[in-house]
Image (cartoon, coloured by chain):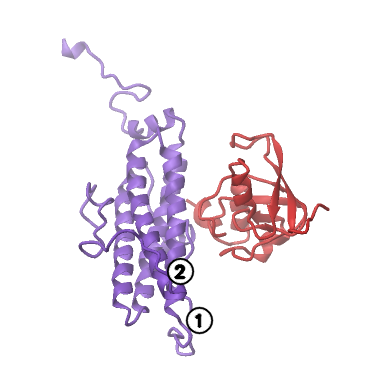
Amino acid sequence: MTQSSHDTWTVTIVVPEESSLDEAGTTSEIAVNADETILAAARSAGVWLPADCQQGWCTTCAARLTDGEVVHPNARRYYDADREAGYVLLCTAKPRADTTIVVDQYDDFLEFRAANDKPPGNSKLNR
Amino acid sequence: MSEEKTHGSGAVEPGDTSTRVGAEVIRERGVDPEELREKLIDAIGAEFTTYYYYTNLRMHLAGEEDYKEITEDARLEDRAHFELVVPRVYELEGSLPNDIRDFADRASCPDAEVPTPMDDTGGFDTSDLEVEDILEVLLEAERCAIRTWSEICDMTREADPRTYDMAQRILNEEMDHEAWFIELLSKERDGEINPAGHFARGEPGDAPYSTNNRFNDSA
């Protein structure tokens, strides 16, 4: 565990090979304060992750939590089922432990939300 | 001899009405026009829902005539943004959802609801509703819009000047709106002078950036 007296955690960002992001296939580590969102910390560190509303609503920033713990105190649309399935919204996610995330999961997350009849899943996919 | 000449039409066959060069030129420049179109629908979904929710927010700024008027400017300009971009969705071979619930569900920004619960009679429980709470909802709605239109500017820059032009006009007005609500919230909540740097519109919902080159007159 790398928690310091300032509650800073190490977040490992995995960008899948199949991602369309410039960083596809790379893994990077950033330091994130407990009161800082992972998205903001990543962008500050030069890792440009997708996002839109930055209020935990649109789900553009969806990622998978593979290790560690985050909280979403300010997310406007984040459900228990999302957490149970290991999905996180990086724009509002704040670490509570050293954490590993797989980013660029928007398409998969829309499918997940649709399967659980939660927005914006079906409104986006049933066009 | 003109009858011997063929039309120069690139990858689109002469006379083919099934494909739009206006979309293909965007694809040639590296942007998926279908992905862009869907993002535009999300963005104008947020403008439309904001127009609706601001109606309620404005009403509940009771007695605060200056706040009401500025909120009305933002409300009408958000509707103008919706109107501005709807034709672009159709140009890119899209359409608005038939069900307005789908439109609201996919809006790229949160519902800007009056920050108070409903009472037992189905009305708003205004007993603890504070002006500063409404102003904070307005401010965060504008901030979301700034992020959305910035994303669309990023997506279309150097690839789709027509959509980029619309997005940057809207972005100009959303940034105005944020400045207004920062000024008002600073004064109301914190007693601080935090000037927006500009004054109210000439007419309610003037939309000086997004309507000075109208694509239609429906707004």
Count of marks placed on residues: 2
Query: Residue A105 got which mark?
Result: none
Image location (x, y in percent) of residue B179:
38, 60
Q: Quadrant of residue B46?
A: bottom left
| Chain coloured purple | B
Q: How crowded is the residue under tag 2: few (<14 C-alpha within 10 Å), some, or many (20+)?
A: many
Residue positioned 48% across, 80% down in the render: B116
Mark 1: give few (<14), some (14-19) or many (20+) Cα within 10 Å. Answer: some
Find residue B17 and report its image quarter.
top left
Q: Is residue A116 visible?
A: yes
The residue wearing badge 2 is B137
* Amino acid type at image mark 1: Pro
Residue B178 coordinates in the image, percent (x, y): 40, 60
User: A20 left or right of B10?
Assistant: right
B69 relative to B82, above or below: below
Inspect the image, locate mark 2, and give the three-letter code of the amino acid beneath it.
Val
Q: Chain of mark 1?
A: B
Marker disc for residue B117: 1
Q: Position of residue B105 (x, y in %)?
A: 49, 61
Against A85, is B6 above or below?
Answer: above
Q: Going from the N terminus, do you reach mark 2 or mark 1 first?
A: 1
Q: Nearer the viewer, residue B46 or B66?
A: B66
> Which chain comes out red in the rendered image?
A
**Image location of residue A103, percent across then percent down:** 65, 45
- Asked if residue B107 shows in the view, the reply is no
Q: Nearer the viewer, residue B210 or B15?
A: B210
Q: Chain of mark 2?
A: B
Residue sitting nearer the eye, A61 or B42: A61
**B190 is higher (above) or lower (below) than B214:** below
The answer to which image quadrant residue B83 occupies is bottom left
